[in-house]
Image: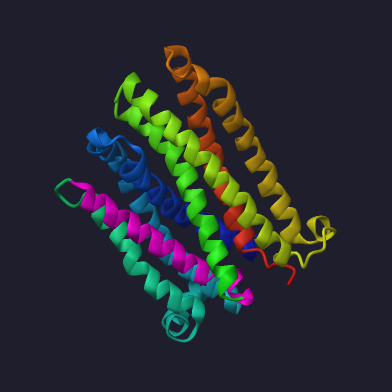
Amino acid sequence: MTQIGARALVAWPLLVAEILILGTAAFALLLAPDTQSEEVANALTPLWRGLGVAAVLFSPLALIVGTANMGDLSLRAAIPLLPQVIRETHFGHVWSWSFPLTLALLVIPWTPGRGRSKTIVLGLVACALLLLVSFSSHAIDRGTIAVIVYFIHEVAAALWIGAILGLWFGAVRGHLGSAWVLQTAPRVSSVAGWTVTILILSGLYTAYYSLGADPHRLIDAAYGRTLVDKICAAMLVLLIGSYNRYWVMPAVSESSAQASLLRNVGIESILLIGVLGLAALLANTPPVH
């Protein structure tokens, strides 16, 4: 496996954990009806716990793989260099800031008690981790605006996948019923429309500068080819989302339409996790600039 592939493979679970936790926490706080937000959080708690475990397991591995790649070393040979990398490199500094927050992702869902405050803290921790991802991305080469746009892109992706995944968990795992789906689905559809618009605009900005405004590099450069793969995968998800929005949603009061909607958003969620894998690969592929 190439160095880029190895970095992307360990970055993928971390990105999935941070994106899904932020998105589903935002769903429980902002989109789920207030009277049942607690039930939604309870339905999402097993997901949050599993994602927290994955994040803690893969975070040290990401440090080892990154160190090995910097020195062109084996994983075993890279381990003695970890303290030096943490002290003396930007990559190590960002990791040292991120790891305590990653531990918090694991601890918070297991703490006793209920309430919106726990969900708020969990969402804020995931948001802070995504901000640190932005500061360790290729966007830092282009300045503050590029970092902000990258962060907005991540948050929009989190809100999109969190909305549709939260709808599925609330209905299927939380057994909140047809009336809850009827009330929540239009909110999810509206948020999905806005977040997709933000994703397209922020993605165009990042692609323009990363490719040096040369469309030929979509084919000639590894970064461009990976970007095309990501766009194609995202377009498939958008087609399913468009079908839901314009064909299923008008009849969402019917039980058959709700069943179709939940099946489709489940498929969308799985496909979006795959898109996040391509996003991790793209983030670890050197841009043309």
Residue at figure coordinates x 70%, y 54% from the top left: 226
Residue at figure coordinates x 52%, y 20% from the top left: 250
Could you say which quadrant of the image residue 108 lies in? bottom left
Instruction: Please state the extent of the stretch shown in magenta in the rendering.
Output: 115-142
Where is the C terminus found, in terms of image quarters?
A: bottom right
Where is the N terminus found, in terms of image quarters?
A: bottom right
What residue occupies the far left of the structure in this picture?
113
Q: How many marks?
A: 0
Q: How is the image coloured?
A: rainbow
Residue 213 lies, in percent from the top left, at 79, 64
Q: Is residue 164 left or right of residue 213?
A: left
Could you say which quadrant of the image residue 95 lies in? bottom left
* Residue 170 visible within the image: yes
Residue 3 lies, in percent from the top left, at 63, 65
Residue at figure coordinates x 75%, y 58% from the top left: 224
Q: Is residue 85 left or right of residue 179?
A: right
Residue 194 lies, in percent from the top left, at 53, 44
Q: Is residue 240 left or right of residue 216?
A: left
Is residue 124 depicted above or below 100 in this figure?
above
Tell whether position 284 is magenta.
Answer: no
Is residue 106 depicted above or below 84 in this figure?
above
Nearer the observer, 164 or 72: 164
* Residue 39 visible within the image: no
Nearer the observer, 195 or 19: 195
Is residue 112 depicted above or below 98 in this figure?
above
Residue 100 lies, in percent from the top left, at 32, 68
Nearer the observer, 118 or 197: 197
